[in-house]
Image (cartoon, grey):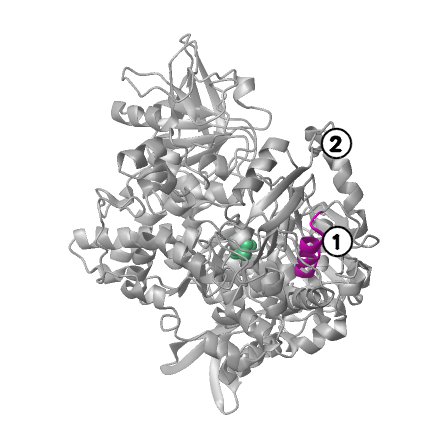
Amino acid sequence: MNTPNTLREFSPAPGRTAHLHSLPALEEAGLGKISRLPVSIRIVLESVLRNCDGKKVAWRDVEALARWNAKSPAPEEIPFVVARIVLQDFTGVPLLVDLAAMRSAVASLGRAPGVIEPLVPVDLVVDHSVQVDFFGSAEALRLNLDMEFERNRERYEFLKWGQQAFETFGVVPPGIGIVHQVNLEYLAKGVLSKEVVVNGQPTRIYYPDTLVGTDSHTTMINGLGVVGWGVGGIEAEAGMLGQPVYFLTPEVVGVHLTGSLREGVTATDLVLRVTELLRKQKVVGKFVEFFGEGAAALSVPDRATIANMAPEYGATMGFFGIDEETLAYLRGTGRPDDLCSAFEAYYRAQGLWGIPRMGDVDYSVELELDLASVVPGVAGPKRPQDRIDLPALKNTFSTLLSKPLTEGGYGKAAPAEPAALDLDGGKNPTQTGRATLRDGSVLIAAITSCTNTSNPSVMLAAALLAKKAVERGLRVNPAVKTSLGPGSRVVTDYLEQTGLQRYLDELGFQTVGYGCTTCIGNSGPLHPAIEDAIVKNDLVAASVLSGNRNFEARVHQNIRANFLMSPPLVVAFALAGTVDIDLSSEPLGTGPDGSPVFLKDLWPTMEEIRSAMAAALKPDVYRRLYTDFAGQNPKWNEVPSSVGEVYGWNPDSTYIQRPPFFDGFGMEAGTIAEIVGARPLGIFGDSVTTDHISPAGAIKKTSPAGRFLSENGVAPADFNSYGSRRGNDRVMTRGTFANVRIKNLMLPGVEGGYTLYFGERDLPAPDKEISAPAGKPAAIFDACTAYKADGVPLVVIAGHEYGTGSSRDWAAKGTNLLGVRAVVAQSFERIHRSNLCGMGVLPLQFPEGVNAATLGLDGTETFDVLGVAGDIRPRQEVTLRIHRADGSTTDQPVTLRIDTPIEIDYCRHGGILPFVLRQILA
Ligand code: SF4
């Protein structure tokens, strides 16, 4: 086929020429009205066009996306080859483990291990491991960092090995900042280039900065006009190794912003309003693109705050186009002049310069939001989309106290008895003195989360409020655990430059760490006397935080009401000490002279914030703080690093182990074989989440993973979490389906990771009393191990939305390693379905209306999956044959949810990792 040549010259700087794959040229070639496509779609289209090689990306993919139909996008998968990858440490360590295992596999085949190298740049930022053990003192930062290094030394040694072993793999060490803020302030380039030869002449090709990240809030970078979102580890691995990330052609919801924010309203208030609005509009799986003069008038940090919460409103992205403001941010954060000039020239040449105005672009749906209509608010106490106008918080909280649990309340017949405590200070000096705890008492006040810490306007507003509070003689109640977790050291610099940090310090908001802290639940322990009082008096205590998620138990196990709000409101509620208050009419404290002090007395004006902002965007500061991480980080330098291309696996490590994905690896692909005589690992209902399948939290002492760690000499106090042990397949496989809340319907009424084993072997008794009329009750891992030894394959039977929740690679990896060959569900969450294919596990879907109940399944059956061998097509019908205990048989047609040809290849090769490895070695 003759495809149009879209390579065009352009000038990235005066006197220089380079090339780009031109979208206007594609339009001239008659491929549709590309200039009317949403900006985000055009940027993805550029990638599809540039990477069209007839194999990974076909010309018909270019045509399909160029003819994107706003009202009815084609139900096609888009192969998106991204320019780079970002990782955080929780999700990044297992990725590096897989890369290291690939190198070991290559070395054992006698080939050069160096052939395994990420094909696009990968940056891992260590931000998820710092916990708030210490606060309220100048020493807190150092002490927390010391503990972080102590707890995570083994993981950090491994990361340092990775840093020296792979040329394209960079690590930003602990103590620098939060991945998304570091991406916004430093890693993102806006436009990238590489050397190529065109018509025999060397030149540079420029292309948009695009990425995927293994963290859902990767979308923060959409505020800088960079297309990117969060994916599971398996997809990121594919992207890293040059494979496309596949996603269904999305609808694009255009949000037309008009007007401007009123005095006293913050970017946080705006993002909570946007979250409330878009949640109601059901934008799951869609792109959201903000446009109009209101969008154009927002600063990049404000845009980034709105983009960051895309996962909370459910969208794949919350995107802003590219304009002078974007360029000003790049310059203000110290990006080099030649990059800034190429950035502007590139997007102008592509017709992508400027935020679209009403009528410029065709969106699937258009929504309106007048920024002047936004009022101050908070969100909670359990979901980020439940926004409450600030004056209504008091009433809402007291209504929720008595509301039944089933209606989202706390189901209390009467308020808790107040608990009066004399705090001894313990290890945190601010916790000294008398405190009385009631329902609604604020016990954690945290300025945290990239959502807000990347935005100088709200950080400075918090500091200005603190200044006025100190000047009025206000103090924070000793019961409140106060913390400031800046997302980068730039924040500290401008808080120091403006002389405002000392006021935050006086209120106990000393910096506790440059990382995720309370936002990810690393809020650390409360004072023991406070923990006791909460439990003893059954208090509904509160946290106030500038984070983005507040699901139950996310912030702290014992704090049940969690309110998201702007950083200045966090300081205000810390001063008030309770959420049972109307800050618009009640004083939040009294000065030393007994006079009441109201929120309005402390709230900074926009003018005050604006004049402080001048300190926040100094290119030299960014350049200084974002160079020589190692030199500025002595603790990182002290971590020993092994050297060499191949990792020296330590068989005794309980954190890092060589996973068995390449055991017995050979160059020949296998075939997909029929499954015969499979036993069910479990039968599950609707909405089994990836956290049910692969929990991230605490490891139970009596669980298979807990037993394994104990047998390997790890004391329960040092178990750490499943999240931190994702580099060890032995722990993670034992943890698969081990969530204490998962319900296997083979054992009605039983919660936890148990199943029935129908075999001859003796298994360890489960750690709770379970009776069953047939089979032997056992922990899922123990049963699966026995089945493996018996040579019996396994299937999982499930309901709707199987694998919903955060994308989690171990949910698919663990399923594979337990011996599961197929998951038969009523419907699948998009990423988890593709991850199952990526691990060679077949996703099968029941027809509408058919499920385990209608088929009368109770777990005593065995199953065959027929029709999957030989030539198969995506989404073809195959047969699930059910052999019942009474000897009868039922043939149930099911859809093979391998959705794309490449996924057939993945399954034939036993998963994406062996597939890619064979491609590289071939
Ligand atoms: S600060 Fe919160 S939202 Fe941001 S990366 Fe960390 S955990 Fe995720």
Say whether residue 785 is left or right of residue 611. left
Nearer-N-terminus badge (1/2): 1
For disc 1, does the CB lie below 8 Å from ligand 1? Answer: no
For disc 2, does the CB lie below 8 Å from ligand 1? Answer: no
Which residue range is magenta in the image? 566-578
Task: State the residue position of label 2.
Answer: 402
Residue shown at 74%/36% (left/top)? Answer: 400
Residue kind at label 1, given as amino acid type? Gly
Compare residues 708 and 365 and report the one nearer the observer: 708
Residue 577 magenta: yes
Instruction: State the mark number for residue 377.
Output: 1
Taking the image in four quarters, ligand 1 sits in the one at: bottom right
Residue 243 magenta: no
On screen, residue 513 above or below 402: below
Residue 538 position within the rendered picture, expressed as x and y whole percent measured from the top left: 63, 32
Residue 818 position within the rendered picture, expressed as x and y whole percent measured from the top left: 35, 32
Quadrant in which the C terminus is drawn: bottom left
